[in-house]
Image: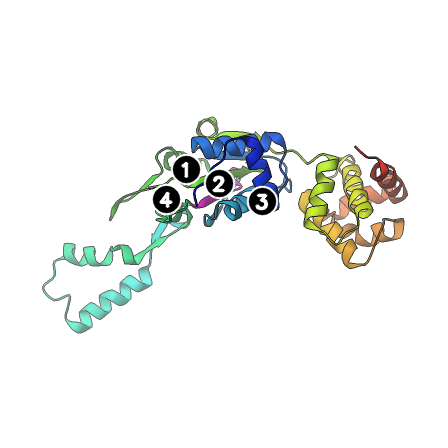
Amino acid sequence: MTLSIATPAEVSAALAAHGYIPDDGLSTSIYLALTLQRPLLLEGEAGVGKTEVAKVLSRWTGGQLIRLQCYEGIDVSQAVYDWDYSRQLLHLRASEATGESLGLTTSALEQQLYHERFLLKRALLQAIDSGAEQPPVLLIDEVDRADDEFEAYLLEVLSEYQITVPELGRFAAVRPPIVILTSNRTRDVHDALKRRCLYHWVEHPDFEREVSIVRMRVPQALDRLARQVAAAVEGLRELHLYKPPGVAETIDWAQALAALGVTELDEKVVSATLGTVLKYREDQERTRQHGIADLVKQAFERGFQRP
């Protein structure tokens, strides 16, 4: 599949057709990333839909989604490549048993052992050496959790789209992957990596866009319930919680309420289902102290407002 996109509006329409409703800024950033073949760094609070961007791009383009989950201490053997030592050992023993290794020099034996068939390609090498007609979508998730050293290595890979394996040589991408990096900003990503990437800060959706997201992802929810849920979540985000609910929690809450046969919010149902949208006891207590009745009242009033 070859992408043919002329405007950010076409990107917006394509993403919506595959289950993601972006704002204009995100559509423009994705358009530029695809057009200029540049990595796109998405920063924002957890739960605003950064990871979902890569998933929907994979569905839209038909490229394989390759996900690298970053964490403290991640290194080349976990992110780029490693050797299948158990298979190498089996090969060595089989060679000895059959006499194949007799007369081979150490160099010749090493060439057998460090063959590509024993290479374990991790996420970065898979994306660089894909070989697929449609470039894969490489998701480098939560890059802010990785160490400085790994971030520096990542910069080198994304600059040239090539990886060198000392025993085999250089692997270079015929078609560069579509690269999406995400960060929850637990620490600042270095300026050098940011300069290599296009950048977009992902906000929580505004009220009407969140209503549209709920309608799309939870079609069994009635329109008034979708509006009340979006309004209630909007109110929760104003309470300065430890972990404000993201779009994922909004969808979870709407799905839970629809599964219970709820058609509109009330104090009892909000209190009973609060754990689907707030995942910390302290946040639930703060919400109850604020007053669930006030939250429901706000949800009804906001839900009745039309753009």
> Gap in Å between the C-alphas at discs 4 and 2?
20 Å
**Amino acid type indicated by mark 1:** Leu
Between 48 and 137, the one nearer to me in the picture: 137
Q: Secondary structure at mark 1?
A: helix
Amino acid of disc 4: Ile
Q: Which mark is residue 52?
A: 3
- Residue 7, horizontal then vertical, whole percent: 53, 30
**The C terminus lies in quadrant:** top right
Q: Amino acid at mark 2?
A: Ala
Residue 146 badge: 2
How many marks do you count on the picture? 4
Eye-nearest disc, 1 or 3? 3
Q: Earlier in the sequence, mark 1 or mark 3?
A: 3
> Which image quadrant for residue 17?
top right
Q: Secondary structure at mark 3?
A: helix
Circle 1 residue: 154
- Which colour style is shown? rainbow
Q: Secondary structure at mark 4?
A: helix
Of labels 4 and 2, the one closer to you? 4
Q: Which mark is residue 267?
A: none
Q: Within the image, what quadrant is residue 94 found in? A: bottom left
**Residues shaded magenta:** 136-144
Look at the image and tell me whether residue 36 can be seen: yes
Q: Nearer the viewer, residue 134 or 147?
A: 134
Q: Is residue 20 magenta?
A: no
* Residue at 55% from the left image edge and 45% from the top image edge: 56
N-term-proximal mark, 4 vs 2? 4
On the picture, is 41 further left or further right than 252? left
**Percent from the top left, x then y, of residue 202?**
61, 34
Asked if disc 1 and disc 2 are in contact, CB closer than 8 Å, the reply is yes
- Can you see residue 188? no
